[in-house]
Image (tube, rainbow, N blue to C red):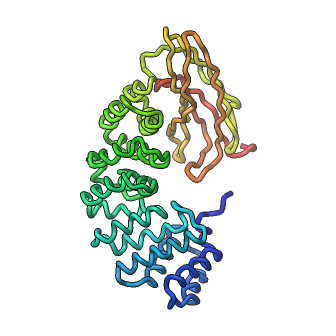
C-alpha cells in the first residue's frame, strides 16, 4: 500500500525548508521554527491539517507587509527550484494559501503573485475565493493568462475557473451561467500543450453537467475546423454526455444511434467471486449496418451499496470500426479490489454491455467477502 501523502512532509523536507526560509529571512530562529514540527500534535495531523499548519507557520515568520510577503514568497520559490523542486509540484501548495489569506482585498498586488505561484505550484484551489469576490476582474485576467508563454499559467486560465473543480470550492455563479468562461476556452482549445488542452476538456465536461446543450453546440461548432488534437479534446469534453448515451453527443463523434447491430449477452467467469478477484466477461458484436460504422463499447457494473441497493457505473471499452457483416469478440477483465475511491460490498451484482449508448441484457454475479462465505 502506498504511503499516505502527509508523510511527504518528513524531517528531510522540513530541514531543507527551514534552511530555505533561513536564506530568505536571515534573522529567523531556525531552532524554534523547526521545533514546531517536532511535537505529538504535528505527528497526529493529517494531510490537509499539515498543509494548513505549514501555511500558518510560514506566514507568521514572513514580513507583515503584503508586498514584502510576496517578494519573500518569490525568493522561497527561487531557492526551492535551485534545490530541485519541479514546477507544478504538490509539495509547496501550502504557499498559495498565503496569497489568498492576505490578498483578496488587493487584487492589483495579488494577480502578479498568482501568476508567479501558479507557474510553480497549484493555485487552482487557493484561487476560488478570488473568483467569488472579483469575478469580472478574474475573468478579464484569465483572458490575459490564456495567452501567457508559460503553459502552467495558461492551464490555470482554464483550470482555475472550472465550475465544479473536484475537491475545490464550487463556483456557483459559473454553474448557473458559464458563458464568461467560454472565451477563455476558445483561446485554449487548440493549445500546443496537452496539459492545457486536458484542462479545457475537464472544464467543458464540468459545464456539460449543467448546460449540455451549450456544450453540444460548442462541440459541433468547433469540430467544423478542428485539428486532430482539438477533436481529441472535444471527445474528452463530451465524456459525461457520451457515458449517458446522449444521442447528439454520440452522433457528433460518429456513433450514430441509427446504426444497426447484433450483440450477444455477456458471459462471465466466474459467476461467484471474492472481493479482490477479477471478473472476466465476454460478448460478441456483429454489425448489421449496410455501411462501415463506428461503435462505442462500454459496460455497466451495478454495484451493491452498503444499504443493499444497486448503483451503476459505466466503464469504457473502446471505439471500434466495423464493416457490414463484420464481428468482434469483446473480452474484458474487471477487478473488484477495494480502492480509496470505492469500497465493495457482498451481494448479487449485475453487468451489462452498452453499444452506442444502448444497454443490453444484464447478467448477475455474486461478490463474496471471503472464500469461506
Q: Position of residue 206 (x, y in %)?
A: 38, 45
**What residue appears at the point 64 percent right and 37 percent down from the top-left corner?**
334
Foreground of the two, 365 or 194: 194
Q: Position of residue 324 (x, y in %)?
A: 54, 10
Looking at the image, residue 143 lies above or below residue 86: above
Foreground of the two, 245 or 249: 249
Looking at the image, residue 159 lies above or below residue 221: below
Q: Which residue is outermost to the left? A: 136
**What residue appears at the point 57 percent right and 48 percent down from the top-left corner?**
342
**What residue appears at the point 42 percent right and 36 percent down from the top-left corner?**
234
Horizontal relation, residue 3 to residue 203: left or right:
right
Horizontal relation, residue 57 to residue 334: left or right:
left
Q: Which residue is outermost to the front? A: 149
Foreground of the two, 214 or 305: 214
Query: Which quarter of the rendering shows the C terminus?
Result: top right
Horizontal relation, residue 287 to residue 373: left or right:
left
Query: Which quarter of the rendering shows the N terminus?
Result: bottom right
Looking at the image, residue 99 lies above or below residue 226: below
Amino acid at each position: 500500500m502506498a504511503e499516505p501523502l502527509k508523510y511527504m512532509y518528513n524531517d528531510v523536507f522540513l530541514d531543507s525548508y527551514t534552511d530555505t526560509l533561513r536564506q530568505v529571512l536571515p534573522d529567523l530562529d531556525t531552532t524554534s521554527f523547526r521545533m514546531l514540527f517536532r511535537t505529538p500534535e504535528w505527528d497526529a495531523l493529517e494531510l490537509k491539517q499539515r498543509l494548513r499548519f505549514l501555511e500558518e507557520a510560514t506566514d507568521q515568520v514572513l514580513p507583515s507587509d503584503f508586498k514584502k510577503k510576496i517578494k519573500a514568497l518569490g525568493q522561497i520559490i527561487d531557492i526551492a527550484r535551485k534545490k530541485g523542486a519541479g514546477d507544478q509540484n504538490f509539495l509547496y501548495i501550502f504557499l498559495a494559501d498565503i496569497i489568498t489569506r492576505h490578498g483578496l482585498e488587493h487584487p492589483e498586488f495579488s494577480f502578479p503573485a498568482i501568476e508567479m505561484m501558479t507557474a510553480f505550484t497549484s493555485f487552482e484551489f487557493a484561487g476560488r475565493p478570488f473568483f467569488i469576490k472579483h469575478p469580472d476582474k478574474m475573468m478579464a485576467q484569465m483572458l490575459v493568462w490564456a495567452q501567457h508563454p508559460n503553459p502552467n499559467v495558461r492551464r490555470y486560465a482554464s483550470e482555475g475557473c472550472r465550475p465544479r473543480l473536484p475537491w475545490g470550492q464550487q463556483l456557483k455563479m459559473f454553474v448557473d451561467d458559464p458563458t464568461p468562461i467560454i472565451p477563455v476556452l476558445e483561446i485554449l482549445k487548440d493549445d500546443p500543450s496537452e496539459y492545457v488542452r486536458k484542462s479545457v476538456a475537464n472544464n467543458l465536461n464540468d459545464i456539460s453537467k449543467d448546460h449540455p446543450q451549450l456544450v453540444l453546440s460548442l462541440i459541433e461548432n468547433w469540430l467544423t475546423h478542428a485539428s486532430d488534437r482539438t477533436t481529441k479534446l472535444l471527445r474528452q469534453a463530451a465524456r459525461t454526455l457520451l457515458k449517458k448515451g446522449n444521442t447528439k453527443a454520440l452522433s457528433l463523434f460518429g456513433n450514430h444511434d441509427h446504426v444497426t447491430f447484433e450483440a450477444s449477452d455477456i458471459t462471465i467467469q466466474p459467476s461467484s467471486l471474492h472481493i479482490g478477484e477479477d471478473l472476466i466477461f465476454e460478448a460478441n458484436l456483429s454489425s448489421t449496418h449496410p455501411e462501415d460504422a463506428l461503435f462505442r463499447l462500454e459496460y455497466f457494473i451495478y454495484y451493491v451499496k452498503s444499504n443493499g441497493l444497486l448503483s451503476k457505473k459505466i466503464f469504457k471499452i473502446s471505439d471500434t470500426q466495423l464493416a457490414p457483416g463484420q464481428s468482434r469478440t469483446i473480452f474484458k477483465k474487471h477487478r473488484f479490489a477495494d480502492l480509496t475511491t470505492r469500497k465493495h460490498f457482498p451481494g448479487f451484482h449485475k453487468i451489462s454491455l452498452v453499444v452506442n449508448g444502448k444497454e443490453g441484457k444484464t447478467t448477475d454475479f455474486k461478490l463474496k467477502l471471503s472464500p469461506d462465505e
